[in-house]
Every structure is written in structure tokens, then in C-alpha cells.
Image: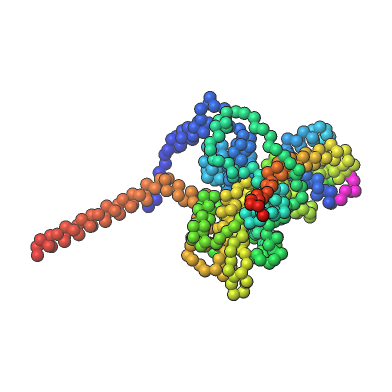
Amino acid sequence: MYVAVKGGERAIQNAHAWLAEERRGDTNVAELSLAQIREQLSLAVNRVMAEGSLYDPDLAALAIKQGRGDLIEAIFLVRAYRTTLPRFGSSRPVETSEMACDRRISATFKDAPGGQVLGPTFDYTHRLLDFKLAAEGDVPEAPAAEPRMEATPHITTFLQGEDIIEREAFSDEVPGDLTREPIAFPAGRAVRLQALTRGDEGFILGMAYSTQRGYARNHAFVGELRIGTVPVEMEIPELGFCIEIGEVELTECETVNQFKGSKTVPPQFTRGYGLVFGQSERKSIAMALVDRALRWEELGEDNLGAPAQDEEFVLSHSDNIQATGFLEHIKLPHYVDFQSELELVRKLRREAAELAETLASREAAE
Amino acid sequence: MNTNFRAEDRKVWMSLLASAEEVRLTELWQDYGLDPDCEFLRAPEVGGIMVRGRMGSTGAPFNVGEMTVTRCALSLADGTVGHGYVQGRCKAKAEIAAKIDALMQTDAAEALSEAVLMPLAQARQEQKTARASKAAATKVEFFTMVRGED
């Protein structure tokens, strides 16, 4: 039997009205503008774009404001909006070798052409709270130097000359798209990378950390980390040629990993890859480590039974919107479900008590 | 109508318009002053495109995520068709881009290029140079400490 229960309409309306008031907070404090969020909380905006899987800083800023700073709520809002957009097409794969780099570092080659460019990084700060930020004040302009306008070559190209690192097999195969087709296993690397780049940063970080702590350890070096903007090119169907339809900021991480070789491949370095919307350094490194761990089968490595090697485990649990949807639904009314459970437990208890009584009386009789 | 433009040039101006800053583009367009009558072939429409990358930057493609794009198509009174494909969700920007695309195919091209496109290109170049200059200032200059006598 299914019993529909109505009610709570007024309570819900009033709850939403209060939510709006609480979102605004103390009205003696100036209201946040979307531009302030976009400009001053840009790393939160980047995370919402990456995991919301939609590059649009203004929209992400709106979602953060609406979600009261709850980034998973904001990601949820962006995902929901995304589904309403007609898809005009797909871009050509972005050329990250053409990136205008704000930051570019290598942990493997000190003297890489293009140099070690730190960019606007938190690294080397002392992580001491800066109370100057509590007061308003002008920020002095950052120093400038002779700009490098030519493209910065990828570090891996230097290793490829020696053939000491695996080559990525080039293709123009149309990649699977998990927003169009549910994930089937084995998913393949293209779908894995899509799932990882939009996956929850905390989850991907935890998985990557587990590989560093020894669960399918793969000895990763950050061969290169670069952050900057790349043009996005798309062919315009009605014109028959490509235009740059815009520009996106990306963080790219290429790891260089030990590999002892297999029956067919001599010892050489292998690679993990991370590419994430926005300035998302932690996520991008974590993505590369998890990508590499998931490639064990293709590289002929042993399955050590580590969580980070288990494609189905990683991909089924990396999406924070799926996860939170399932997790949070259990707080919604389950009155009828619970009523039947209650009946069942009462019945079991009654039966257990009766059995105990029967046994006790039998024992007494003997 | 002037068919003397090259597809290569069209690609350049459409690309410039696509990532032009909304406010700046609107200002320049208003200053240009001419707003031709036109008919929408496709009213401004907001949508998304899937951005792709390559595994290891050089391998097989995969989907990174979508970005918002607004498009619009229109024709001028003389039948010239203009297309606007711009980043973001601004319908007015897509419409201006489509009008400029149409006018760039006419005799208005030279004046329009000077009034709108060149300032946009310059602004973009300046912005890129400014960021590259700040990046350059954070480049590490290594030096080696020599200790001992030989």
C-alpha cells in the first residue's frame, strides 16, 4: 500500500524565506556582489566551475552566493543549470603547449627551457594569518619583468628525444561523454579523465594520497605543472572553419612515474595526466596520480587490490553531486519505510521473547 | 556587399569578438555609431560547448567540461549574413558580434576595423603582455654557491 501524505507547504515556504534572510546575514554589513566573489574568491569559483563542469565564472559566483558559500551546493546549482543548455558542439582539443602560462614549474628539471615560473602561488608563504587583510588597503602592484611571449615547450618533449618516457598514442577518436551515456565498466581512460576532472577534489586528493602512502605506489614526480589560459577553438558548422570561441584558464599536471618495464616494453618512465578548469593545482596533481594508478592494467602492472587501482570504485564514488544526493536523501521523510521496519522489529522481538519463554518453561519441566 | 575579405581574416575577427570583454565591446560599438537594420536568422541563443583536451597533452582526446557560449545569426538589408559566436551568456554581445561580422563583409569593413576591432586587439595584447610580465618577474634565477678553496 502506498499512502500519500500532504502537508508542510507553509512550513517549507517559511523555511525558504528564513533561508533568504540568513543568506543575507546582518544587513548592517554590505552585501556581497557577484563581481566581488568572482574576483576575490576566485579559487572557490574555479572549484565550482571544475566540479560543476561548466566554465562560466559569473555563474559560479552566483551559485556560491546562492549556496551561502557551500561549494557542493553551488556545484549542484551549476550542474542543474548545465543540463538546461543546448549543446552547440565540441571544441578541438585545447593545445596546452600554446598556453599563456601564469605559472610553470618542474620538479624534475631545474633548467627547463622557459624556466621555473612561480606565478601567484601560496607556496613559500608561511601560512601565518595576515591581519593586514582584515583592514582595507591598497595592494601594491606586482613587479613586472621582460615578458616571454613565445610558447613554453612541455617538459616531456625533452624526455621523448631519448625515448625514455612513454609516448601518448595520438588519435582523433571521439571520446566517450559521461554526461550523455552512463558510465559502463571498463570505462576507458577518456571517460576516467572526464570523471576525475569533474570529481570531488577531496575524494580525488584522498585517493591520490593513498597511492603515495603505499596503496599501489607509483613513485610520481611532478614533471610539470602549468597554469594559464588557452584559446578554445571550435568549428562553426554553418561556416566550415574554426574560430576561437573563447579562452579558458586551465591547470595541467604531468607526472613522470617509475616503470620497470614489461615483456614487451623496456624500462622507461610512464605518465599520469591532470587537466582541470581554473587555477586548481591540488586537484590537478591528484588527478594525475589517480590517472596513473588506474592505468595498471594497460601497463601490465599487478593489481594490488588498492582502492586507487579500482576503476569502478573510483569512478562510482568520485562525483560529489551523486554522492551527496544519495547521502542526503535519507534525511527526507521515510515515515512509511520506517513504519514497516518498526513493525518488523517489534514482531521479531515478540517472536524472540516467545521462543525464550518456551525454552525456559521446557527447561523447568525437565 | 564586398566579398574581398579572406576566410582567414574572418576567423581572426570572429575570434577577437568571441573573447572580447562585454563592456568594452559595447562601448566601442556604441561609439562607432552605425547600427544597421537587420533580420535575425537565429535569435541570440545561450548554450554550451564541450571543451576537450588530450591525454598527456598530445594523445587521444577526452572531455574536460563545458563552457557557456551565445550565438546569433542575422542578415543585413543587402542580404549579407553575419554570425556571432561569443563566450559567456550575453545575448547583446552575440548580437553585436553578428552585426560586426556582417558589416566586416561590406564596404564598412575598414572604418569598423579601425573603430572596434583594432582597439579590441590592442586591449587584448596589452592584457596578455601585462600578465606575461608579472609571470616573468616570478621566474626563478638559480645561482650556485661555491664553497671551499678548489
Tally of marks: 0
Q: Is residue A220 above or below residue A86?
A: below
Left or right of A206 on screen, residue A261? right
Q: Position of residue A344 (x, y in %)?
A: 30, 54
Percent x, y of residue A322:
51, 51
Residue A1 horizontal/vertical position (percent)? 37, 52
At x 53%, y 53%, the residue is A204
Across and down, in percent, residue A23 comes to: 51, 33
Left or right, A336 with reference to A363: right
Relative depth, front residue between A31 and A335: A31
A140 w.r.t. A343: above or below: above
Q: Which quadrant of the structure image shows residue A62?
A: top right
Residue sticking out furthest to the bottom: A263
Vertical arrangement, residue A110 with respect to residue A25, above or below:
below
Q: Quadrant of the C terminus of chain A?
A: bottom left
Is A296 part of what is drawn in magenta? no
Q: Is residue A256 visible?
A: yes
Taking the spot 75% from the left edge, 49% from the top edge, the residue there is: A244
Q: Is residue A119 above or below residue A172?
A: above
- What residue range appears in magenta? B1-6
Residue appearing at x 69%, y 66% in the figure = A162
Could you say which is closer to the camera, residue A188 or residue B83? A188
